[in-house]
């Protein structure tokens, strides 16, 4: 065995040990950061629904619509519309028929509202 082979083995051993130790520390730190600051998929989806509701609220205000007016246009009760405009309506409650009615009421294309919720037309047709 050459002298260089022993050094290469030692380097590889040290490198592998370092990568294992560092990898373990890195995984622990990442898990802790994710636990502390991470956002789950459910939270991300609910964040979209919240942003969607707030967006619809701003557009409705710019169009001079009050919650009762919007409720009348889309066929919902006022309390549910107020909840929607505050971003408190869960994403799963925002079905495609409602998106189409909202789009017509606020003068937007339904596809824009679907995109805001992370949906496509194909998704809406499957769930309808």
Image (cartoon, grey):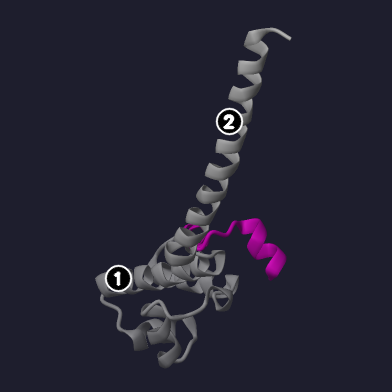
Disc 2 packing (10 Å; few <14; some 14–19; many ≥20): few
Of the pair 8 and 76, the residue shown nearer to us: 8
- Percent position of residue 2, x then y: 69, 7
> Does 99 sit above or below residue 10?
below
The residue indicated by pointer 2 is: 14
66 left or right, relative to 2: left
Point out the stretch of residues depicted in magenta.
109-128
- Percent position of residue 8, x then y: 63, 17
Residue furthest top as drawn: 2
Q: Earlier in the sequence, mark 2 or mark 1?
A: 2
Q: CA distance from mark 2 to mark 1?
A: 59 Å
- Percent position of residue 59, x then y: 32, 68
In reply to whether residue 49 is colored magenta, the answer given is: no
Which mark identifies residue 109?
A: none
Q: Quadrant of residue 66?
A: bottom left
> Does 91 sit above or below residue 123?
below
| Tags 2 and 1 touching, CB below 8 Å | no
Name the residue at 46% across, 72% down. Answer: 102
The residue indicated by pointer 1 is: 58
């Amino acid at each position: 065995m050459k002298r260089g082979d022993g050094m290469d083995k030692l380097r590889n051993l040290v490198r592998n040990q370092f990568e294992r130790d560092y990898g373990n520390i890195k995984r622990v730190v990442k898990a802790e950061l994710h636990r502390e600051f991470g956002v789950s998929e459910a939270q991300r989806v609910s964040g979209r629904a919240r942003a969607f509701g707030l967006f619809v609220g701003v557009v409705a205000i710019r169009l001079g619509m009050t919650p009762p007016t919007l409720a009348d246009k889309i066929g919902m009760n006022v309390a549910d519309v107020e909840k929607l405009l505050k971003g408190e309506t869960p994403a799963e409650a925002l079905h495609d028929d409602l998106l189409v009615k909202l789009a017509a009421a606020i003068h937007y294309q339904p596809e824009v509202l679907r995109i805001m919720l992370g949906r496509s037309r194909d998704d809406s047709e499957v769930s309808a």
